[in-house]
Image (cartoon, helix red, strand yellow):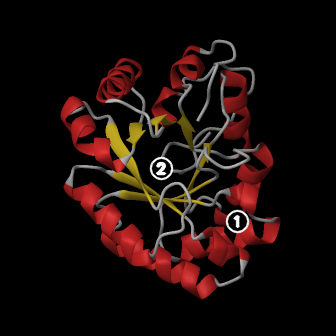
Amino acid sequence: MRNQEGDSESPFDPSQRYDLAPIIDHTLLKAEATAEQVDRLCDEALAFRFASVCVNPAWVRQAVQRLAGSGVRVCTVAGFPLGATTAAQKAHEAAAALEDGAEEVDMVLAIGLARAGAWRAVRAEMDAVRSAVPKGHAVLKVILETCHLDGEQKAEACRAALDAGLDFVKTSTGFGPGGATAEDVALMRGVVGDAMGVKASGGIRDYEGAIRMVQAGATRLGLSASVAVARGTGLATSGY
């Protein structure tokens, strides 16, 4: 397996039962999320020692206060969920989130630009957000929304992220027509090697599904069904 930063560790052994909590971003990105639900999310993250909670920017300050001193990080999103805002807007959103205390930002790729093959513009956007989220100061991930890209577009987006010095490539927003697949995770890992983390998200609802992503090369998991996965229990009723 690899650790949550994406560095190689011991080989994966499918006969073992793994504690996945340290690589889980416990996620609540629904529009209808309430303050009470955000507090519950944070309390679950504390209880299970998840890597982070991932919330919309409006909830970053609350999550930071709830998790203060715990070591559980606060992750948020930029250009979410469509990726259809400008590079400057994504950079501003990311910078504001860091001011509020976020330590990780998941930006959405400019999907239309990627589909059109406008890779210089894609790279320029990544550079702009990376400037707002300085490497070593906070973690920056890019969500590819893989369900909208073909294989070469996924690979080229990964190469752009690698060249821009991003920290992770991520499969999905959880709001598109498709989520994470082991095939996409393996493709992404094959492109970035050990130089970046790979985050699988979207539709992962149980331990077995999570393990398939880890086997394929994921070093971080974005889940709303985090508690079910951490417990190794059956199918959850919903999954980010």
Residue 108 percent coordinates (x, y): 53, 61
- Circle 2 — which element? loop
Residue in the image at 21% along x and 51% along y:
100
Could you tell whether 25 is left or right of 156 in the image? left
The one nearer the camera, 124 or 16, is 124
Mark 1–mark 2 distance (CA, rounded to whole Å): 16 Å
Q: Is residue 184 visible?
A: yes
As drawn, which residue projects farthest toward the front?
32
1 or 2: tag closer to the N-terminus: 2
- Circle 1 — which element? helix
Which label was assigned to residue 19?
A: none
Residue for badge 1: 191
Picture quarter with the N terminus: top right
Q: Is residue 13 visible?
A: no
Residue 33: quadrant of the picture? top left
The one nearer the camera, 154 or 176, is 176
Callout 1: few (<14), some (14-19), or many (20+) C-alpha neighbours within 10 Å?
some
Residue for badge 2: 5
Residue in the image at 72% along x and 24% along y:
208
Residue 39: quadrant of the picture? top left
Callout 2, which amino acid? Glu
